[in-house]
Amino acid sequence: MKLNVKDSDIYVPDGISLEKALDRTTHLGVGAHPDDLEVLAFHGIIACYVNPDFWFTGVTCTNGSGSPRQGAYAGVSDKEMIKIRREEQREASRLGKYSSMLQLGYQSSAIKSSNANSLVNDLEKILAEARPQILYTHNPLDKHATHTAVCLAVLKAVRLLPVSLRPEKILGCEVWRDLDWLPEKHKVVLDVGGHRELESSLLSAFKSQIAGGKRYDLAVSGRRLAQATFLDTHRPDRLESAIYALDLTPLVAEKAFELKTFIENILEEFRKSVEKQLENLTGLLSSPQKKGNNVKG
C-alpha cells in the first residue's frame, strides 16, 4: 500500500503480508499520536487479544515529534524522538498481538489544516482494504485539537466509502476529556476489566512519554477504574474497569446527521438534564422564614 507521507511506517508483527493482515482485520483503531490507540481502543485490542477469530489493526496519524520531554529524553531532537516513538508503537503492537500497525507520519500541523485531504485519502484506502466491523477513534468533543482533527478526518474518509464497506460501529473514545457527563442514551460503556497485565504492559511500552513527564500509565488505569465505580450512583460496581465512548455511527449512516447538529443535540440534552434536576430540587434553595419576623406594631 502506498501512503502519502514518505516516512510512514508499516509493520506486521507476525510477518505476513500487509494485504493479508488487513484482510483478517475485524477491529481497527485510528489515533492521532503514538500511544493514543492503547488509551482509546483498548476495548478492541482486548477483544482481538483473547479471541483468535478477531484481529486488531492500529493506525497512528502523526509522528509524535512534538511530545514533551525531560530527564533522560530532555536532549532528544525531534528527529530522534520520531524514531523512538515509532519503535515504542511497534513494541505495543507486538505486545498486543496486532494484525498490523500503520504509522502514517504526518505532522500535527498538517492534519489540522483545512487542506488535510492527504490524511483522508490514506484513511480511505486503509478502511477500504481492512473493512473492519468496529472502528475506534477519538471523539469530536476531545480537548486536544489534533485528536479532534483526526476524528473529523476519519468521519470524512468513512463517508467516502460505499455504504456496504462502512464499519458496522464507529466509537469515539475518551482521551483528553472524559465522557462521563454524556446523556445515558449517547454513552457507550466499554468493559475493559480483567486485563490489568496487558493494560500495564501496553501503556508502559511508551517509556519516552512516561519519563518525559506524563504518567499516562497511572492516569489511564486510574480513570478506567473511576469510570467503573462512578458509572452508577445507586448500585454496587458491576465492572472492574471501563472506557466511555460516543457512538459516531449515525454520522456515517446513509442518511447521516450533520456533525454540528449531532453535537448540539447532545449538549442540549445534557443542559436539559441538569436544569431538570435543579428544578426538582429548587425548594432546597429557598430561604427558610425566620421565626418572629411577623412582629405586630
Image (spheres, helix red, strand yellow):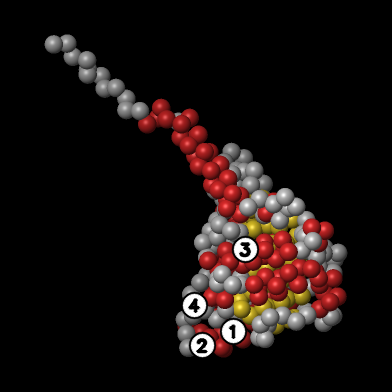
Q: Nearer the viewer, mark 1 or mark 3?
A: 3
Q: Amino acid at mark 4?
A: Pro
Q: Is residue 185 visible?
A: yes
Mark 4 Cα-neighbour bin, 10 Å: few <14, some 14–19, many ≥20: some
Mark 3 vs mark 2, CA separation in Å:
31 Å
Residue 41 position in % (x across, y down)? 68, 63
User: Residue tagged by mark 3?
Assistant: 152
Counting residues from the N terminus, which is met first, the one under dot 3 or under dot 4? Answer: 4
C-beta proximity under 8 Å, tags 4 and 2: no
Mark 3 Cα-neighbour bin, 10 Å: few <14, some 14–19, many ≥20: many
User: Residue tagged by mark 2?
Assistant: 76
C-beta proximity under 8 Å, tags 1 and 3: no
Tag 4 secondary structure: loop
Q: Amino acid at mark 3?
A: Leu
Counting residues from the N terminus, which is met first, the one under dot 4 or under dot 2? Answer: 4
Q: Nearer the viewer, mark 2 or mark 1?
A: 1
Residue shown at 75% from the left, 82% from the top: 2
User: Residue tagged by mark 1?
Assistant: 82
C-beta proximity under 8 Å, tags 3 and 2: no
